[in-house]
Amino acid sequence: MAESVKRRQEVEALLKQIPGVSSRLRQRLLFAAALTKLLSTEPIVVGGTAEEYWAGGEYHPTDLDLCPGLSPGDVKALASVGLHKRGRHWTRADLPVAVEFPGPGDDIERTVKLRISGVSILMISCEDLYLDRLRQATSSWPREDVSFDAAFEIALTNYLTLDWDYVRVRLRKIVIRERVIGSLMGAVNRRVRARARRGSLGPASESV
């Protein structure tokens, strides 16, 4: 019981920091830190917050997306700190950030740890986020949509450090499981990477 009370106090202390922070990205990361201490499974930051972290700059207002989904115990834990579900999002009147749990995150194979206000949180890897945006971009391919633009920004910003060998291997595995989607993702990747390579300052390298 004492441990539960202490954890609740730590969560509340993190939540109370959020309104006083000017950076929208840090607000969301503080929220992720609070929920990391509260939830039964360590959540992974995905979606627009991850895109902003990896690509830099805030392209559009976004809420916090976390994976995986919630257990019945997690739902009770969120309610215990005053969060209420409104449609897809969990909100609290004094917080400028809402949180959504969009799915299980089964495609996430790599994460990185960030330290936020003394709490370690998990962020989807640059590579897995890039692959997610490639997948989303297939829905309107060959027309370039917002997901294509996101994949390009991620590739351009991280061109020299992104693990392209890992991307290549993941794409091959996806083709085996989902031939059509995998082939489309490969086509999107080739265009994105060629354009990012031209825009980067690094040396040219072979396409995936």
Image (spheres, helix red, strand yellow):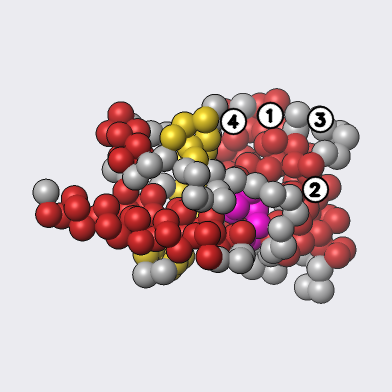
Question: Nearer the observer, disc 1 or disc 4?
Answer: 1
Give the CA separation, mark 2 to mark 3. Answer: 12 Å
Please identify the dominant SS of the magenta region: helix
Q: Which mark is residue 176?
A: 4
Q: Which mark is residue 149?
A: 2
The percent coordinates of residue 150 (x first, y second) are 74, 49
User: On the picture, is 116 further left or further right than 3?
Assistant: right
Report the amino acid beneath label 2.
Asp
Foreground tag (1 vs 3) = 3
Secondary-structure class at tag 4: helix
Determine contact: label 2, label 1, CB under 8 Å. no
Q: Position of residue 15 (x, y in %)?
A: 42, 56
Please say whether residue 49 is one of the residues in the magenta stretch.
Answer: yes
* Tags 2 and 4 touching, CB below 8 Å: no
* Res 25 → quadrant: bottom right
Q: In the image, what residue occupies the spot 18% across and 50% down? A: 4
Nearest to N terminus: mark 2 or mark 1:
2
Which span of residues is magenta-colored?
48-54
Give the alpha-carbon distance from disc 1 to disc 3, as whole Å. 12 Å
Q: SS class of the residue under badge 1?
A: helix
**Which residue is tagged 3?**
140
Nearer the viewer's eye, disc 2 or disc 1? 2
Q: Which residue is mark 1?
A: 181
- Amino acid at circle 3: Ser
| Occupied quadrant, residue 135 | top right
Position of 98 compared to 74: left or right? right
**Which residue is painted at 39% across and 55% down in the image?**
34
Marks 2 & 3, CB-CB < 8 Å contact: no
- Residue type (three-letter) at the residue carrying disc 1: Ile
